[in-house]
Amino acid sequence: MWTAIDSPIGELRVVADDEAIVAIDFSPFDRGPGRDDNNPLLRRAADQLTEYFAGRRTTFDLPLSPRGTDFQRRVWAELLKIDHGQTATYGQIAHRLGMTNAASRAVGAANGANPIPVVIPCHRVIGANGKLTGYAGGLDRKRALLDLERPAPTQPSLPDTELPPWAR
């Protein structure tokens, strides 16, 4: 079963089985049978994604069941540990899995196979040089997601010595 939502990165199709979210697809996607806009799990996922894109949510609270190899699922579990507004390199993910930098390409391949983008934040993984590298949804979407998560600039606070006497 599936539902679709509008987002700043294009329409998304959210797919679930009876118990968990199994995929999020970027447009264009298959509009075959099984659309269910009233399913409680799909509704919850759509609501949380809408809140995320509106800047009102930084984490997701959804049951997930990504389908992949054991290695892919290990990589995806590491992606869930990258906080909103933060990034990690493919090499860092490899090291977190107890591997060397030589595993960076395998991590990249697993990252690219992530069936639940946005919620499992594969967009937060960047190249060793800090540059954006491949993204299944395209680099424009990756850039938009990272920009969405970028913290708003704050005004620097002045040291007490620079405050006027009435404000100390």
Image (cartoon, rainbow, N blue to C red):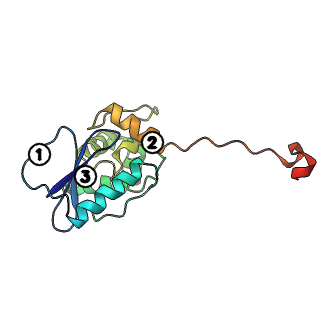
Q: Is residue 84 left or right of residue 46?
A: right
Q: Secondary structure at mark 2?
A: helix
Q: Count residues near mark 3 (Cα–Cα under 10 Å), then give few for <14, some for 14-19, many for 20+.
A: many
- The residue wearing badge 1 is 31
Question: If the image is split into quadrants, where does the N terminus sit?
Answer: bottom left
Q: Residue at x 26, y 56 (%)?
A: 73
Q: Quick check: marks 2 and 1 in contact, CB under 8 Å? A: no
Q: Secondary structure at mark 1?
A: loop
- The residue wearing badge 3 is 72
Marks 3 and 1, how far apart at CA? 27 Å
Q: Is residue 32 left or right of residue 162?
A: left
Residue 22's image quarter?
A: bottom left
Tell me which label, 3 or 1, sits earlier in the chain: 1
Tell me which label, 2 or 1, sits earlier in the chain: 1
Q: Amino acid at mark 1?
A: Arg
Front position among marks 3 and 2: 2
Q: Amino acid at mark 3?
A: Gln
Front position among marks 2 and 1: 1
Q: Count residues near mark 1 (Cα–Cα under 10 Å), then give few for <14, some for 14-19, many for 20+.
A: few
Q: Residue at x 20, y 64 (%)?
A: 39
Viewer can see residue 97? no
Q: Determine which of the numbered discs, if any, sits on residue 108 in the image.
A: none
The residue lying toward the viewer, choosing from 95 and 83, is 83
- The residue wearing badge 2 is 148
Marks 2 and 1, how far apart at CA? 28 Å
Marks 3 and 2, how far apart at CA? 26 Å
